[in-house]
Image (cartoon, helix red, strand yellow):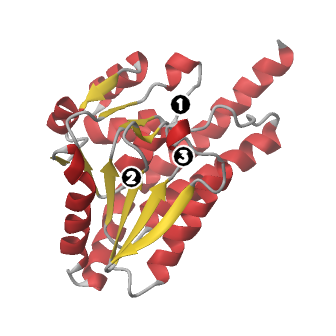
Amino acid sequence: MSEGVRFEMRGGTGVILLDRPEAMNAWDAATRRRIADGLHAYDRDEAVRAVVLTGAGERAFGAGQDLREKRPSGDAEVDAWIDAWAAFFGALRGLGKPLIAALNGVAAGSSFQAALMCDLRVAHPGVRVGQPELRNGIPSSMGPWILHACLGPARAAELVMTGRLVPAEEAKSLGLLDRIVPRADVLPESLALAEELGSRPAIATRRTKERLRALTEPGFQSAITAWKAMLRAASHDQASA
């Protein structure tokens, strides 16, 4: 699955396309490394003014973690696995240029979290977003943190505990989506938005994004630490079962 991502240039906008529609664009560790590497490369390239992250096909922006991938066991594996996640999410959060999520379909689990780490989110009326890990027996730290940061404790608890997928109009009313456009217009609208934001002074944009990131960095780091503790405990539970 590691080849399931493509990189394109559309004018001054770099496009990252998750290209595993048969797997609802779920990702594995190798795919996430490629995306992080691509983000770092775009950040260094002065010709790139903004970035759009999207998915192939019409069903899903991303289904989150590919559940077929082997789960870590033992403290060392758990720590290494989550450190890799921290590097991936850190690349999204650390991009100094505008980052737009073009949601072509469902965004679930870690794919939803990644979309929320982008600066803006464009979707169509058929999009649904949510945090369904608990339904699959997967404890989540990053989902509760980012939803709590976006919505506050009550709404975060409702979405995390029910695991329901939120329709686009409701998600927009909650502030989880920024624009809803016809399905065919999601990518063009995202590219136009990226071009608009990318035309602004680059240094001011980067410094503003650094400030926005700093406001949530303590919570992000706390979520990473808690995630390790949660998965370590789960690994010990399985070993003793």
User: Residue 187 sits in which quadrant?
Assistant: bottom left
Quadrant for the C terminus in the image: top right
Q: Are marks 2 and 3 in contact (CB under 8 Å)?
A: no
* Kind of element beneath mark 2: helix
Residue at the image point whose x is 48% and y is 82% from the top: 44
Of residue 134 and residue 108, the one placed in the foreground of this image is 108
Amino acid type indicated by mark 3: Arg
Using the image, determine if residue 12 lies above or below residue 219. Answer: below
Mark 1: amino acid: Ser
Q: Nearer the viewer, residue 28 or 86?
A: 28
Q: Name the residue nearer the viewer: 55 or 116.
A: 55
Tell me the crowding category of disc 3: few under 14, some 14 to 19, or many 20 or more residues within 10 angstroms, Cα based: many
Q: Is residue 95 above or below residue 43?
A: above
Dot placed on the residue nearer the N-terminal end, 1 or 2: 2
x%, y% of residue 2? 66, 54
Disc marking residue 140? 1
Residue 65 locus on image (x, y percent) = 58, 38
Q: Is 11 placed left or right of 192 in the picture?
A: right
- Mark 2 / mark 3, whichever is N-terminal: 3
Q: Position of residue 202 (x, y in %)?
A: 29, 83
Q: Earlier in the sequence, mark 3 or mark 1?
A: 3
